[in-house]
Image: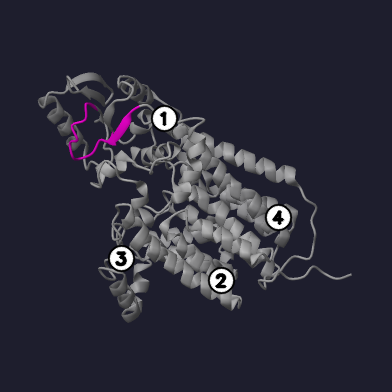
Amino acid sequence: MTSAPSPPGGLPRTGRRAPRDPAIVAAITVLAAALYATAGLLRLYGFRLGTYDLVIFDQAVRSYSRFELPVSIAKGVHNDFGWSFAVLGDHWSPILALLAPFYWLHDGPETLIVLQAVLMAAAIPVLWVFARRRLGTPAAHFVAAAYALSWPVAEAVVFDFHEVAFAPVLTALVIERHDAGKVRQAVAAGALLLCVKEDMGLLVAGYGLFLLAIRRWLWGAVLLVGGVGAVLVATKALIPAFGGRDDYYWAYGALGPDLPSAALGAVTDPLGALALLGTPPVKSATMLMLGAMVLFLCLLSPMVLIAVPLLAARMLASSFPNWWGTEYHYNAFLVVVLFCAAVDGIARFDLARFRLPLALAAVAAALVPFFAYGRLSWPGPRTAAAAEAVAAVPDGALVEAANYVGPALTSRTRVLLWDREPRWAPWVVAETSRMTFPFTSREEQVGRVDLLKRSGYRVVVERDGFVVLNRPGR
């Protein structure tokens, strides 16, 4: 009797064939999707999601649903790109067009929250198949549960909606199809990743690095060069073609003012570039948390190379501090890679194939209270005041809305972000009880309301820090 052959990628395979247990993985997937959707909707109905970014994506997908370019007036006006700005000029994410048909069923940000939940959970069966093939069925259940409860996913699903929703399932397909010996199918999934965001070429390049490490020279070289090339094409050609700027997200001023000078700076001063990876210390803390999430088992596998280019691009940045921490959605781009690398590391070194996956799930569960789910709360008095303010704005109005108010208005009005530049919209919903993006102080917000009153706006509703103003005759 012969043992199961090793996969073409040179990756070790467990010789055991565990019985399938689709009911358990289906339950994990459904429960995870329900958890993600509930968390996101609680935040939405509690007025804790933002115009920036949820309304931006809502307006863009609504435009797609009308067979139009993905225009977002909230993004275009706030960032001085204009009223007809298409978000393809901000991030290259044409895959968002796939969400448009769901807006024919329900036109509103709730749709995006639920779709994000489903997409994030969709990675679970694919990850489970990969882990079962390597470690057996019981271990695969624990790996699936660990991903489902992982803090990068939690942070992503409670922070508005973002294109990252597509990344885990596509990344899982890349790795699982490679492991199954279907490199062409893995490359096809990688090609879809390029439609998620302009920097996903770095994940594809990382896949190329991994293939080179396991001596798949041709595919490795093609994907490494092709991934980097895709980033350059998206940034330098596609984004400017839709009205964006190729340097808008340039974050490497400490290395140089542009890509050639930054690359030269990194080569001529490699120690300085390495120092940037841990400066400020929050970068090191985030990388430690990512490693701890998988007990650093990812370091036992060359598969971890898939994550290196994208992670390095974030941590070499000297601006855009949101990229560096554990909050927000950025770590969810890497989470599947790290779990798959951990599984591969366990299999390669024939470690405790049951106990270590169990430990992964235990770590994920133990961290739950310390990240996004621990910050969830039921709607309170602030919610009632915000709802009263929102109800005062008529359907179809053009309204400047405070950051956390816009999502409640976007399905029936035209929403602009209430920001530091007066837009003189007919309706304004302000918030003055606490500082709200993009203002720098609560006093500035109070001053803006006073300016509107002096300029002829009348107060329609004022309750618990929410102020609705209307310009008579408009």
* Alpha carbons under labels 1 and 3: distance apart: 37 Å
Which residue is tagged 1? 46
- Amino acid carrying label 4: it is Ala
Placement of 130 over or under 159, stated as above or below:
below
Q: Secondary structure at mark 3?
A: loop
* Alpha carbons under labels 4 and 3: distance apart: 41 Å
Q: Do the CB atoms of the residues marked 1 and 3 lie less than 8 Å apart?
A: no
Which residue is tagged 3? 252
Q: Secondary structure at mark 1?
A: loop
* Alpha carbons under labels 1 and 2: distance apart: 43 Å
* Alpha carbons under labels 1 and 4: distance apart: 38 Å
Q: Quadrant of the C terminus?
A: top left
Report x, y in % for residue 97.
47, 45
Res 355 quadrant in image: bottom right
- Amino acid carrying label 1: it is Gly
The mark lying in front, picked from 1 and 3, is: 3
Which residue is tagged 4? 139
Q: Identify the mark nearer the N-term, 1 or 2.
A: 1
Report x, y in % for residue 353.
71, 61
